[in-house]
Amino acid sequence: AYPLIVTALLAAGFVLAALRPGSATSSDPFIRRLVYVWVAQNIVLVISSILRLELYVGIYALTYWRVAAFVWMGLVAAGLALIIARIALGKSNEWLLSANLLTLSATLYACSFINFAALIANYNVEHSFEMTGHGTELDFWYLRSLGPSARPALDRFLEQQARTNAASVSPYRELARLLGQDEARYRAAQENWRAWSFRDWRLLRTLDTSIPFVVPQGSERFVPGR
């Protein structure tokens, strides 16, 4: 994603320098067509990078950095599209800068409402080898590191393993034990009213309605709620 950001900045710098309002080059049709072709080529490059990242996620699952890469690439594509709009509409450089800042602000504002930890956990669980029979095995230790928001997805994962008798395997039993400890600490922290948030309130309601997991002893079959 970083080279794409540099590419977008170079394209913007070239447009600002070569197509300044009132300059000789700004009214040259040949120069304008060259800029269109160059920016369009960069947009195609961004789209191909997004598709390649999608294939990478399909094999190696989703992480925070890969989500960030999707967001960055989307911003780069939007910035390049705004460059074309600036040329086609004959807008000023100030308009281009303001439009990019508005796009960035809107993106950051929208991201503040997205629970990325839950998004990553849900995606990885639903597309894991254990749940679908194909793809990559679930890195449940990484999901646990995402915090309490990943708990509902991990609960679904353990329920699925319980149906296949796989949950009696030592790593799954250890995961269930640690998740119980994590939940106890999380509930203790939420007793402080200063820690309240709407997202945590919804998560607590989900945890209250979920069936508790009991870690089996030895080779005993893993059964939720027993």
Image (cartoon, rainbow, N blue to C red):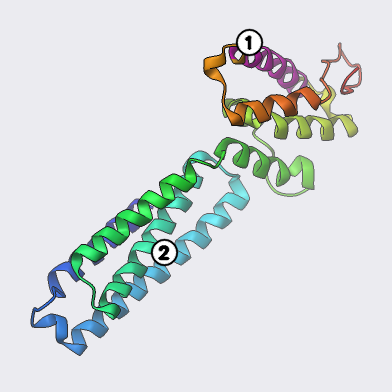
Q: Where is residue 192 in the image (x, y as percent from the top left)?
A: 57, 11
Magenta span dominant secondary structure? helix
Residue beneath disc 1: 188
Under mark 2, the amino acid is Val
Element on which disc 1 rests: helix
* Magenta-colored stretch includes residue 163: no
Whether pointer 2 and pointer 1 mark residues with C-beta atoms closer than 8 Å, the reply is no
Q: Is residue 112 placed above or below 104 in the rendered structure?
A: above
Quarter of the picture containing the C terminus is top right
Q: Is residue 21 in sight in this rendering?
A: yes
Under mark 1, the amino acid is Ala
User: How many marks overall?
Assistant: 2
Q: Is residue 167 placed above or below 81 in the rendered structure?
A: above
Q: Is residue 141 in sight in this rendering?
A: no
Q: Quadrant of residue 79?
A: bottom left
Q: Quadrant of residue 42?
A: bottom left
Element on which disc 2 rests: helix
Q: Give the range drawn in magenta.
A: 171-189
Name the mark nearer the viewer: 2 or 1: 1
Q: Position of residue 75 (x, y in %)?
A: 39, 57
**Closer to the camera in the image, 209 or 212:** 209
Q: Residue furthest bottom?
A: 29
Q: Where is residue 96 in the image (x, y as percent from the top left)?
A: 26, 64
Label 2 CA crowd tier, 10 Å (few <14, some 14–19, many 20+): many
* Magenta-colored stretch includes residue 184: yes
Residue 50 is left or right of residue 223, and the answer is left
Q: Is residue 94 placed above or below 63 in the rendered structure?
A: below
Residue beneath disc 2: 46
Q: Which residue lies furthest to the front in this view?
A: 193
Q: Quadrant of residue 24?
A: bottom left
